[in-house]
Amino acid sequence: MSAELLNRGGGVAARAVAPDLVGGPSERQTWSLLARTHDLARASKQLESPESYGVVLTGERGIGKSGLARAVVSSLGPKIHSLQLRNTIANGRTPYGCLGFLLARLPSDAVGSATGILHGVTSLIRAEAAGRKTLLIVDNAGGMDPMSTGVLLNLMVTGTAKVISTVQRASDLPSDFHRLVLEGQLGEVHLNTLSEEQTKQVLGSVLGHYVSSTLVGSLHSAVGGNPMLLHALLDEQRHSGNLVLNDSVWTLRDRIKLEGATVVEDFVRSRLAREPQANRTVVELLACAQRATLVDLAGIFGTEVLVEMEESGLLTVERADEHWVSLRDNYVGEVVRGWLTTRRRRELRLMLLGPKEPDLHGLAAQDLLSYAAWMHACEDEPAPSASHALAAGRAALDDYDPNFAIQCTLSLDKNDAEWVPGQRLKAAAYLMLDLPLHAAQALDEVGESHIAALDPLEFAEVTAAKCQAMTWIDGRSGMVPGVIAAGLDTLARKAGANGAYPDGIIERARNRLNLCGYEYKAYMGEYAAIVAALEDELAKDPAEDREHWLRSAFLLIEARCVLGRELEAQQLARTVSRQLGSGDRTAPLEEAFARHTFLVLLLSGQWRKCIELMRRAPSTPARLQYRGALTELGVGLAYAYAGKPSQALEPLRSAVAQLELRPAMNMVKVAYAATAFAYAQLGNSLEAGRYLDLYRTCRGVGTYFSESVAEFCAEMAGRWMGDPEAKHRLMARAHLDIAKERYTTAGICLFGATVEGTDEEYRLLEDIAGRRQGPLAKIAAELALGSQMKSSRRLLGAADEAAALDLQVVEARCVAMALDFARDAGETTAARTAQLRLERLEQSVSALPIQPRSDAPVLTERERQIAKLAGKGVSNREIAMDIGVSVRTVEGHLYQVFTKLGVSSRGELNGLL
């Protein structure tokens, strides 16, 4: 690396190791304990073993070895006498270097020989220990001088002291120490970087509130799970104002930038200061290129340099195909890029790529993005060609970097053939930023002269892009059908006026506008109007227009589900998933498929699969910034619909905090309503009311599905809070859905509205259930029939179906009704079964959605304990001895149990409890 890297900022090495930069020892020790409880236990176990001489803590620099060593000593308490030995490069060249402070306290006659020093140090340590066990902490033991090594070995072998030492690799230890590690006499505990889950636990403990997935994923990725850098970067994000506490949730305003992150920069400077010039140049080059082939780098630097850098942990080399080489830690590249001058960037580009622009068709998306960023950073160099700029912008958008996508389009000239596609790209980027007006303005810049010159497919793409932008602008969505109709007329004129277009281009252009019409109808909830056309699209050959076929299939999945064909929708989703996997899986297609599949799973009661789907979503920092909130909202919705409000609140609160800072598709109103629903289920009317007020003040509308979900959650929150009008609003919503043949959403609204419903309402619920498919339809039908027939058997059957889906609140509702009907009919066994089942459910759900009309006697904890043992065949005497009461007491409790449950023998207890 150039001299500017080493000298910039002054005092690099000294500042990098200054402990005050990342808090005092006690603070760093706290972080170590939070992240390293398992490692702490392993190290302590090694030290307490009588066969062990101590333990070696290994791991990369900054991983927290010294902090863990101090934590181990602290955990052992005052019974341990500890001494800290610091080994430095200077000490390693000096005999007894790390023991110098002990030698200074020895009498002068003891330091005249090696034997005298050995005995003197041993006596001094034993005297100061005063009968306690001694533990020597040796930092950076790798470069220890031979004389110090000999003394420490003697202290261990004689039982005078045990050692806890830190080193990057065990092989770096003095040979005698390494031999003890290999023979198992010195234990080794290797410290890995923190996992993302460990990062979340540490942040939650340190910050004291909910932490968003965006914050966790971004911080974890930025520093590669390094605890010391995590601590430092968290501090710097807080001081810069990028880390914010919004409604008791910690999240980020913007993406993390390591430029200016003092501790991280100093850490990287210190690390690279010890590297040879060639190694530093490799780091600089890969910081700009992000990756390069092994052949290209070896041709410039030679293989020995690369092998050495891989062994030292600076590089990673893929073992397949091109053998791509990249920096092992991404944060090193980001920090180094911030140091490089424009001139140095140009030198490095010429070194790797030469003066020519690389072949666009040979570039992967990752290489295209790094090349474009490299060229933009060179400032006064010629901008990338129009084709490269457009391709880079598309790759940036697929990588969830809309700002860079927009930056790529700025170099396009109106005379370039790529300018109109560039405006479409700019509009798509603005939509990702939730700026539909900006998107529309970008498309409005495409004038009539440009429109007239477009080929049919590009014309259709521009028209569709305009419709997408207009859909999200208040007051303009109603204009979309007219724009589509006009576009189809223009296509017809183009087809008639010029027959020279390539085969199929007119048909593909029509497909694009037809798809735009389907999307608009789905946005409005008009599924019945498009389902037949979508079925026709599905029957076509996917190879003719693969993207059109896939996106039509996505919409058909949604349409089938909402129209009551849930099982057919799930089957189609599986078919489409296989088709999607057989070709290119671009990020937009993946995201669209996940969105439609989530809808099907949520409305079908498959809440566990919803959560699995959301957690499989890519968690790159860029995606988290723009889609992390929606992922957490999806998880929270699944829990709320499943009747698990306690699990729902954390992701929902996190989604609210992020969507308030970075809106996306008007989904914040869904987050408000779902959070109110969760709080209402927990009985917290104050918080539920607060979020309902936020929901009601939201402006703008979303898709039919998002509006439907938001309204359902808001009205169900009202039902749980005792709002008598909520039922009427749910019924009105159901009737509106029925009129549009949306039987699935109608059935869900009816299910919520008919808690304590009338026979007429149950007949409607039964009718709608008959128009649907799947387990939720079966539960609704059984509940409706059981309510009308006063049948406990049917209701318990519905409860079994709900239990199979782990919908405990629905199960509890069915069981509570079954209990009432069984009592009314004098069905003793059914009532007893229902009562005990309801008692079990009360332990799992936050509150019962419906209370039985009159509670049966409930067993006390002691009665339940004795009844369980008796049901297993345990005698009264054995029960008495087991729980520490008299036999007569046991007999009295069993009498109460038999009376309450209406049983006459122990055998009947087995299975009831």
Image (cartoon, helix red, strand yellow):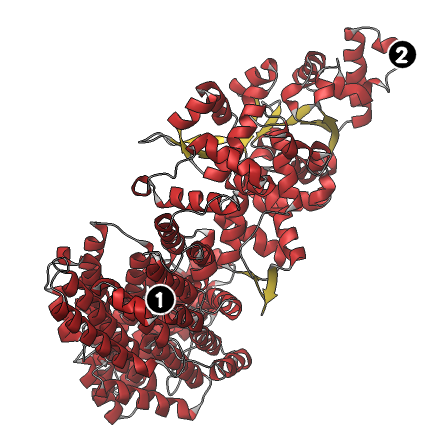
Q: Secondary structure at mark 2?
A: helix
Side of 882 where 414 appears, left or right: left
Residue 788 percent across, percent down from the top left: 22, 89
Between 106 and 364, the one nearer to me in the picture? 364
For disc 2, the neighbor class at 10 Å (few under 14, some 14 to 19, many from 20) is few
Q: Secondary structure at mark 1?
A: loop
Residue 184 percent across, percent down from the top left: 53, 21
In the displayed structure, 851 sits above or below 682; it is below
Q: Which mark is residue 108?
A: 2
| Earlier sequence position, callout 2 versus callout 1 | 2
Residue type indicated by callout 2: Ser
Q: Residue at 38% of width from left, 76% of height from top?
A: 702
In the displayed structure, 133 sits above or below 789; it is above
* Residue 254 visible in the picture: yes
In the displayed structure, 870 sits above or below 436; it is above
- How many marks the image carries: the answer is 2
Between 370 and 620, the one nearer to me in the picture? 370
Mark 2–mark 1 CB contact (< 8 Å): no
* Res 601 → quadrant: bottom left
Q: Which mark is residue 913?
A: 1
* Res 45 → quadrant: top right
Q: Residue at 78% of width from left, 27% of height from top?
A: 129
Q: Which mark is residue 569?
A: none
Q: Residue at 62% of width from left, 42% of height from top?
A: 264
* Residue 903 visible in the picture: no
Residue 375 percent across, percent down from the top left: 47, 44
**Quadrant showing the N terminus:** top right
Residue type indicated by callout 1: Leu
